[in-house]
Amino acid sequence: MKTTIEISDVLLRRAKRLAARRGTTLRAVLEQALRAELEAEARVTTAPPVETHTFGGNGLQAGLTWGDWSALRAYAYEGRGG
């Protein structure tokens, strides 16, 4: 497919020199660079798996529910002057 792009003169000259050093075409250099960038982005946007940790216990104390932050905070600081 043919398309038109605007890039800086300096970048274009560098890409042409790279193509000449490699004995290839400007098109091949640009396609390879674009592929590498797209592959790098795909690797970055894939989030690593979340590690979960568990420990012995019986879950929330009686009377506490998730989202009841004032009660959770009071329990966490109970006996500690909070």
Image (cartoon, rainbow, N blue to C red):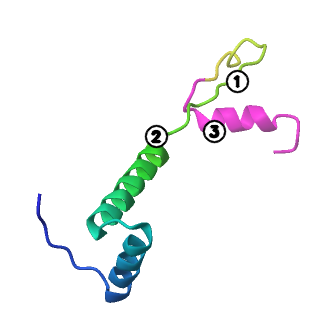
Q: Hey, which residue is sitting farthest left in the picture?
A: 2
Give the residue number, with chain letter if any, for mark 2: 46
User: What residue span does the magenta drawing correspond to?
Assistant: 65-82
Q: Residue at x 78, y 13 (%)?
A: 56
- Which of pointers 2 and 3 lies earlier in the amino acid sequence? 2
Label 1 packing within 10 angstroms: few (<14), some (14-19), many (20+)? few
**Disc 2 on helix, strand or loop?**
loop
* Amino acid identity at mark 1: His
Up the image or down, 60 lies above or below 68; here it is above
Q: Please name the amino acid that badge 3 sits on.
A: Ser
- Report the side of 32 relative to 53 (left or right): left
Q: Secondary structure at mark 1?
A: loop
- Numbered mark located on residue 70 in the image: 3
Q: Is residue 18 above or below residue 58?
A: below
Front disc: 2 or 3: 2
Identify the residue at image location x=20%, y=74%. Answer: 5
Q: Position of residue 67 (x, y in %)?
A: 54, 32
User: What residue type is disc 2 on?
Assistant: Thr
Q: Residues within 10 Å of mark 2 (few under 14, many from 20)?
A: few
Residue drawn at point x = 65 percent, y = 33 percent: 71
Frontmost of labels 2 and 1 is: 2
Q: Earlier in the sequence, mark 3 or mark 1?
A: 1
